[in-house]
Amino acid sequence: MSDFKGLIRDRIDQLEDLAEASRAATATVELDQTRQGRLSRMDALQGQAMAKDAERRRGEQLGRLRAALARLERGEFGECLECGEMIAEARLRADPGTTLCVTCASEAEKR
């Protein structure tokens, strides 16, 4: 499980770099009808909304990865928070922030 620490930190770094690079996309869209038409402004507002949603999802993912790093430090990384069984390594490699095994995740989806 020690190699997961590097994997998690790499993903955190990537997400933080991506967040920094996309900050301009979430800036306030100015209302200047002399410079741009109504449709261009609507496109800009839609792009801004999409960028803000992407930023929100990145924030959630960062939180999950930081929590995974904390679980790793406590020796609890890889344990399903529902049933306590170990989560499959392939699942953890695909998403190190996951907290549920496949069975519990499937049950949670049904609820």
Image (cartoon, helix red, strand yellow):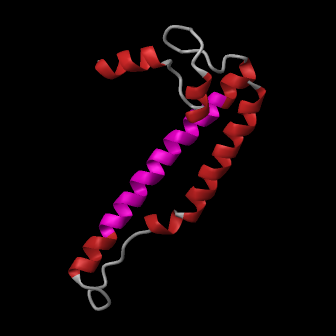
Looking at the figure, which quarter contains the C terminus?
A: top left
In this rendering, the answer to whether 105 lies above or below 47 is above
Looking at the figure, which quarter contains the N terminus?
A: top right
Q: Does the magenta run of residues contain 58?
A: yes
Q: Nearer the viewer, residue 5 or 37?
A: 5
Residue at the (30%, 79%) spot, across then down? 31
Residue at the (62%, 20%) spot, across then down? 78
Magenta region's main secondary structure? helix
Residue at the (38%, 19%) spot, across then down? 106
Q: Is residue 103 left or right of residue 10?
A: left
Q: Nearer the viewer, residue 9 or 88?
A: 88
Residue 92 position in % (x across, y down): 59, 28
Residue 69 position in % (x across, y down): 68, 30
In this rendering, the answer to whether 38 lies above or below 62 is below
Name the quadrant containing residue 62. top right
Q: Nearer the viewer, residue 71 or 8?
A: 8
Extent of the magenta region: 45-68
Q: Does the magenta run of residues contain 74?
A: no
Residue farthest to the bottom?
Answer: 34
Residue farthest to the left?
Answer: 38
In this rendering, the answer to whether 46 lies above or below 107 is below
Residue 20 position in % (x across, y down): 59, 61
Residue at the (43%, 15%) spot, across then down? 104
Q: Is residue 81 left or right of residue 51?
A: right
In this rendering, the answer to whether 93 lies above or below 50 is above
